[in-house]
Amino acid sequence: MRKSPFLVLVLLLVAGSTLADEGMWTFDNLPAQLVRERHGVELSAGWLARVRRATVRLEGGCTASIASSSGLLLTNHHCVRQCLRELSTPGRDISAAGFLAGKLGAEERCASEQASVLEGMEEITAAVRAAVGDDADPRANERRKAVLTRLEHACEQAGQQRGEPRACEAVTLYGGGQYFLYRYRRYDDVRLVFVPEGEVAFFGGDVDNFQFPRWSLDFALLRLYVDGRPAHTPDFLRWRAAGAADGEPVFVAGHPGSTQRLQTAAQLGFERELILGHWLLRAAELRGRYLQFAAGGSEQARVVEVPLFALENAFKVRRQQMAALLAPGFLAAREREEQALRAAVAADGSLRAAAGAWDEIDAALDRYRGFYDRHVFLEQGAALQGELGTAARLLVRLAGERGKPNEQRQRSFTEAALPLLRQQLLAPGPVHPELEALRLGFSLEKLVEYLGVDDPVARLALGGESPQALAGRLVRETRLADPAFRAQIWDGGQPALERSSDPLLMLALRLEPAALAVRRRYEDEVEAPIRAAEEGLARARFAVLGTSTYPDASFTLRLSYGAVQGWREDGRDIAPFTRLDGLYARATGQPPFRLPARWQQLQSRLDGSTRFNFSTSNDIVGGNSGSPVIDTRGRLVGLAFDGNLHSIAGDYGYDARLNRAVSVHPAAMLLALRDVYGAGRLLHELTLE
Amino acid sequence: MRKSPFLVLVLLLVAGSTLADEGMWTFDNLPAQLVRERHGVELSAGWLARVRRATVRLEGGCTASIASSSGLLLTNHHCVRQCLRELSTPGRDISAAGFLAGKLGAEERCASEQASVLEGMEEITAAVRAAVGDDADPRANERRKAVLTRLEHACEQAGQQRGEPRACEAVTLYGGGQYFLYRYRRYDDVRLVFVPEGEVAFFGGDVDNFQFPRWSLDFALLRLYVDGRPAHTPDFLRWRAAGAADGEPVFVAGHPGSTQRLQTAAQLGFERELILGHWLLRAAELRGRYLQFAAGGSEQARVVEVPLFALENAFKVRRQQMAALLAPGFLAAREREEQALRAAVAADGSLRAAAGAWDEIDAALDRYRGFYDRHVFLEQGAALQGELGTAARLLVRLAGERGKPNEQRQRSFTEAALPLLRQQLLAPGPVHPELEALRLGFSLEKLVEYLGVDDPVARLALGGESPQALAGRLVRETRLADPAFRAQIWDGGQPALERSSDPLLMLALRLEPAALAVRRRYEDEVEAPIRAAEEGLARARFAVLGTSTYPDASFTLRLSYGAVQGWREDGRDIAPFTRLDGLYARATGQPPFRLPARWQQLQSRLDGSTRFNFSTSNDIVGGNSGSPVIDTRGRLVGLAFDGNLHSIAGDYGYDARLNRAVSVHPAAMLLALRDVYGAGRLLHELTLE
């Protein structure tokens, strides 16, 4: 690579922060030198391979690690909430009461969950580029999607022919700077083995969420099954009961969901103005409705628990992100970095193609501003929220897409994507009519508020009824709460759909042309030019900075390096470990600081000095929940479940002084299994060191 | 005034927009030349004096006009909502059903309302400056408040000695560039005469609020009383039944509440980041709670109506303001204007004192950022919302302040301020325990969320209880719902307060030291330096621009000029008038588009071509609600009740292409009184032309 003093300056400006414990690195491009320099650690190929095969993606949106050769999985309690909800009934609330399968046969299936282990990855950038051709061509975007679908399909078929069933996924990195094909072993039978009571798993509730010091026993055990028997999983992580010491280097393997670190200042401005701004206001109102609904009684509180948790968690994240983007100087600093890269691009004739990228992104965002709300409501589902509304939209879209050749389908409806979609949609989860009416009514009200009551689509949706009246009627009359009916529509396709005359399906069908139109507009006027511009920027960044950067998160496997570490804030040192006695000191007896009866009774018999939660400098975000924290010898020394408040702005960048990941200590989990829950069978299965 | 080409450029940049129908002008400084040039109108001293004396400030936050010599007032339905709430009971919902006093004796008193007519204004800038002395002195801020209080008090006493009771108010203009003493005739007996049904007054509800074309009959009639008899009001406005023609010049006299047009870019950034940002998120959540509460039944819907309307109205305003401040380029444009003024200041040695003003404001805002939430919760009342919580805070503060000499009191608790405060606090309004528990519980939850559960003040407030449990208990146990108890505490002062052991009063008392501490900090570290800097900026603006600008709104009497005018948007022309037949066309039978039975039945007998609402180019904001729209001959041609959506960003500036005021047409009000409500007595009292 050519280097000039100017380019070195740019490099320092743009990549300066990678001197800290920053980055969510792909397993093929680890910054070995940085890890060596900062932590004196050399990761072997064997270490990497074993960690990769022992790290599991939960398709519901989390990570897990394999804890035994019989498919035992360790993840967070908050990662199995949907499963707990599906397995609970009015008389049996395992989300509150916890669950322990006394024997193998008592482990219960999580109907909508699947799990994947990454078996291999292959770069396909050249093949994609060849198929796409000229980026400026209006149809380039479609050709790009088609080739990704084709390569996935070919990969899956090759596996079938060899008798090695696999799931294949095309992965876009660096905004299109690189393309990979990831091959997964996929498990569609995942069962619940153990969870503690909700009160201790989510101790401190939303109040303490993203806070540290912290005392949450946020763990759960699952098991992978194949053909009705526990999966054989030779690669698993032994647990190091004593955990890691203060300052010790540790690694987090997992699936960070998404970050925006490579976006332009204008994209972040759009994020602030519309994406976060509008979402937060709607989410806050829905939160108020959920909380008031929960105040109606204990059964209402129970049924709203899962959506409320998801909402409050996302709300806290996005509120903090908004704060970061509104803080004086934040965007200005990003603009200065951008100016440096722009100057480098302008100075290098070979990068001329990228010079216009920023303006092209600006222009695309300006167009998007004109129909952003319409896109969110009609195509991103904001107009029909809830289990029933989501099912209706999916079934209507599916019926249309399945009529097309695989490569012409939307990427979420390709043959490769359908098995998971089907399992999730047909899972026999409970549907609560009162809550569904609340969510659907709220959606329709917001549709009217954002698009305007005189908008043709709003009129088409309401047909003269008020949002609340319409929502109440649809929830009463639709048959979509019945999994058998959903299966019948799935299997019957467009004819079954039209024959059904189900009023909620009919509403989704009425809105479908407008939804498809706004999707088309988005793809052509926003997605395509931005993708092309981002590819140009990625090439320019590679030319200037090499591959010393990492791609934005994309819910694919990454490794983060760091150390057990507290931080300093407002003149105070925050120590990296909490202890069990701190949990008891914080318990007030009132939610969300109430302990389960069992924990209250055992207080005097448990060792108060047991380490409970701890903080590390690893750079993680949502999707890393359930990730193993691993020492240099490949042993599990923690279970990541959260970050501190500062880590939330990690969506836009990592601040080494303040960003910390927060994990459950293995000593706390072992104490719980042994001394609180008497889970001898599971303890016996773990390999401890 | 010295002029240079550079300064002329600055003038055009900073004041350029005053070439449009912009401005909320004080009656002593009208832009006579601009009005002449734009509209060919010369306003006589007689016109101005009569309009001033016929325009009334409703202390609840609105404007009214005098419509007869017997004290009849015209204002908006939405301006009397609090009164309707106070006069309604579970069996008699006049907010929904409307109200018509068949005879004088049937007019009912609005217990918490007062009304004021501006009788005179006197500039006191020199006296204030002399008393304040050196602005940089840390105690200058206190001396400023003391002299304002002293001048008000002297003014009121002088009035009493002459047997002319008056209310006097010191008014700060141009951020302290000018001070005035305003003398008011105040009426503390205001009675309800007529309101239409809520469904037609607020037709379209929150959905149509700030929209145009529009069909709202948002009017009400009140009457001023003196000694139990209708007030004698020789200056009143005749009504011009035909209204004004398209393009005709019209004036709006009223009391715009507040604007931020003279604030620096950094102040607007702070507004966006914290003031609007935090408020909107809390308001959205509270809105969700209110709406879900209202879904509980018709009685719940009734009792939540007034706070819900206030909240949704403010929410729509602030959401639109936030959108303006987030729009690309908005703040950047303000910064460019600011740079021009800074350059002019730097170039003029005599303005050197103002050169540091911007940096001083930045520094003060940085300090404020560190305790903004604490200030909002403890001192601005966010921690104890609701009727009961507000009463508790007021009574606790009052007891402390009344022990001090008048001039040392907080400005809201001076002798001049107490009569209105007392009347509002002791008004026998209904208190709804369920709603109070919701509001108080919400406040305490947010206190914990924003300050943190471990904050000493949050702990002091909760004392180990959960926010909801504490709120429920306080509402059950407090006696503050009883007006006699409130009067007893008001009269008994600190000893009565402490003796009461009322739990809600005790909570407010416990929080009082922290509230006073944060207030002190705000006054010393934020308010004082910003006020000093703003005075410097005001002087610099006067030096560069003269008094060709108008001061920011301050809920004092202003005049706006303009014309009946539609606007062009998205390639469409919006016509300035709507008609009665449009109202019927829009009625769906479903709230908020349902008409009262009476209006449904009469449809065929009413003249569909009657003008209903109309738009004008006048520059108005909240507080102008209820303002008369007046023609060049001083006749009432409309009743302002709203602006279009664009007008909301009028808080920060006026856009002549898009900002429009929205008013009720006199023909619609007369048709309603005559043909719908049969209000012959009132029609007879009006003077029509």
Image (spheres, coloured by chain):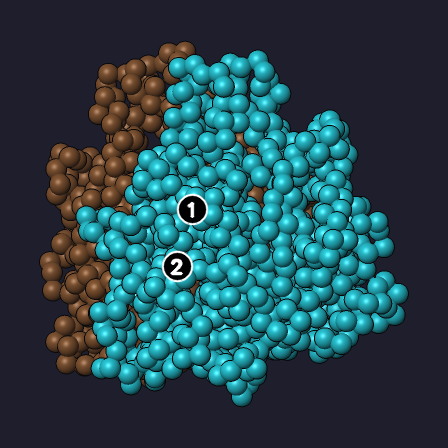
Chain colours: A cyan, B brown
User: Which residue lies at the image location 40% right of the left edge and 80% below the top edge?
Assistant: A680
Give the side of residue B669 with respect to residue B455, left or right: right
Most extreme residue toward the bottom is A91
Give the camera-side residue of B668 and B43. B668
Residue A107 location (% of width, % of height): 55, 78
Q: Which residue is mark 2?
A: A636
Residue A285 location (% of width, % of height): 51, 62
Identified by mark 1, the residue type is: Ser
Q: Is residue B541 visible?
A: yes
The subunit carrying tag 1 is: A
Determine if marks 1 and 2 fall on one subunit: yes
Residue B49: name its quadrant.
top left
Residue B562 location (% of width, % of height): 55, 38
Give the camera-side residue of A509 and B515. A509
User: Which residue lies at the image location 53% right of the left edge and 74% below the top edge?
Assistant: A192
Residue B417 circle label: none
Q: Which residue is mark 1?
A: A560
In the rendered view of the protein, which quadrant contains the N terminus of chain B? Answer: top left
Residue B421 location (% of width, % of height): 29, 65
Mark-to-mark CA distance, 1 and 2: 14 Å
Give the mark nearest the N terminus, 1 or 2.
Answer: 1
User: Which residue lies at the image location 23% right of the left edge and 55% below the top edge?
Assistant: A575
User: Which residue lies at the image location 47% right of the left edge and 80% below the top edge?
Assistant: A100
The subunit carrying tag 2 is: A
Give the side of residue A572 with respect to residue A251, left or right: left
